[in-house]
């Protein structure tokens, strides 16, 4: 009975691992990639929930084997210490996740082609 319970537990763990691994997408960064860095720890700011979560973009200068990245600013200034890959997001993916709203695009256009309203 005990052996059957252990075997059942192992099989269950394998099934759960397989299901989890299907959805995991490994993050692979290369030198020259543009990334956004998460602002850690959260700042005490008056803007509250409107405080930005990411800063950047930054350029990956060096990739270490343990998942650490050495970043530089767009001006070429190096970060003093490496940053964990969990605290960054690819710049390209960030742009794809937040597409411009058609309503916002409409509001941001110049007033060309808009007829003025005349009072009768």
Image (cartoon, rainbow, N blue to C red):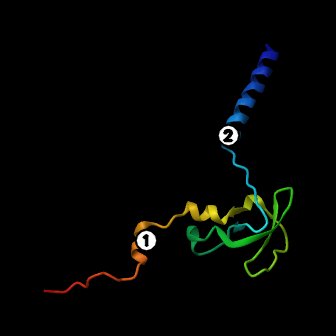
Q: Position of residue 20 (x, y in %)?
A: 69, 39
Position of 35 relative to 8 (above/below): below
**Picture quadrant where residue 117 is located:** bottom left
Q: Position of residue 16 (x, y in %)?
A: 70, 33
**Residue sitting at 26 percent across and 82 percent down?**
115
**Residue sitting at 72 percent across and 78 percent down?**
74
Say what secondary structure mark 1 lies in. helix
Residue linked to disc 2:
22
N-term-proximal mark, 2 vs 1? 2
Front in this rendered view, residue 77 or 55? 77
Front in this rendered view, residue 115 or 53? 115
**Picture quadrant where residue 90 is located:** bottom right
Are dots 2 and 1 in contact, CB under 8 Å? no
Callout 1 environment at 10 Å: few (<14), some (14 to 19), or many (20+)? few
**Residue sitting at 73 percent across and 54 percent down?**
27
Q: Position of residue 8 (x, y in %)?
A: 75, 21
Q: Residue 16 has which mark?
A: none
Mark 2 vs mark 1, CA separation in Å? 37 Å
Callout 2 environment at 10 Å: few (<14), some (14 to 19), or many (20+)? few
Front in this rendered view, residue 56 or 28? 28
Residue ranking furthest to the top:
1
Position of 63 relative to 44 (above/below): above
Say what secondary structure mark 2 lies in. helix
Q: Quadrant of the C terminus?
A: bottom left
Residue linked to disc 1:
104
Residue ranking furthest to the right:
65
Q: Quadrant of the N terminus?
A: top right
Position of 73 relative to 38 (above/below): below
Tally of marks:
2
Q: Is residue 108 left or right of residue 66?
A: left
Q: Position of residue 64 (x, y in %)?
A: 86, 60
């Amino acid at each position: 009975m005990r052996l059957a319970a252990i075997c059942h537990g192992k099989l269950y763990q394998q099934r759960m691992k397989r299901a989890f691994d299907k959805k995991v997408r490994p993050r692979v960064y290369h030198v020259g990639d543009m990334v956004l860095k998460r602002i850690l720890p959260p700042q005490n700011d008056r803007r509250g929930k409107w405080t930005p979560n990411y800063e950047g973009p930054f350029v990956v200068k060096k990739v270490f084997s343990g998942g650490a990245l050495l970043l530089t600013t767009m001006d070429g200034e190096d970060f003093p210490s490496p940053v964990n890959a969990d605290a960054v997001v690819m710049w390209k993916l960030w742009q794809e996740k937040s597409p411009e709203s058609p309503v916002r695009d409409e509001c941001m256009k110049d007033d060309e082609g808009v007829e003025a309203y005349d009072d009768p």
